[in-house]
Amino acid sequence: MEYTGSRYNGEHQNGRLEGKGEYILPTETCYQGEMKDGMFHGQGTLFFPNGSKYEARWDSGIALEGKYTFADGLQYEKEKWRYCDGYDRRFYTEICNGLKPAGRSQLTNLDPPREIPEGCYDCGDGFYDPVSRVVNDYQNRFLRNADEDEHEWIIQTCRKGWDEITGYKPKH
């Protein structure tokens, strides 16, 4: 594990990770649950650094069935998913706590939203710098290099860290 940057605290059997334990990945994603032959096996939960979690029943490292819960408590529903659809655009915190008074819009599910560094975009799991094409997490640790598709998607859809004048622009 020293080569992968992972850590394990838990039971061993015949020199293998087996029984109940906690496996921490280099990204600080943490699995807590049952292990067999060095793999997630049985009941276990993945806890992500952003506060979300995935509870599942595992078989030799493969999730057979599970439930994803976002950091704010919203549970993902595979069927009849109605959150942020075309008809109800409220954030989950607005669904739980009501809308803000007129004139105080909520830009993200976080209130107040994260402050985005100048020239960067907030792409949901970190900040994206379009010049270097690098996504760093919110603690400024490297996550990934964006390919062309992700770059275009971020530029078109994500919040940016600067203001621009929008609207009608006269020709002269």
Image (cartoon, helix red, strand yellow):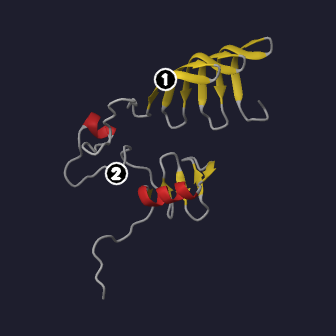
* Residue 95 image position (x, y, % from top left): 27, 36
Please determine whether, in this image, residue 17 is positioned above or below residue 140.
above
* Residue 87 image position (x, y, % from top left): 24, 43
Mark 1: which amino acid? Gly
In front: mark 2 or mark 1? 1
Q: Which residue is mark 1?
A: 66
Residue furthest out toward the left: 102
* Residue 96 image position (x, y, % from top left): 28, 34
Residue 122 numbered tag: none
Q: Residue at left 70%, top 24%? A: 8
The N terminus is located in which quarter? top right
Q: Residue at left 55%, top 62%? A: 130
The C terminus is located in which quarter? bottom left
Please determine whether, in this image, residue 73 is positioned above or below residue 111.
above
* Displayed quadrant of residue 10: top right
Dot 2: element: loop
Which of 65/169 is in front?
65
Q: Which residue is mark 2?
A: 107
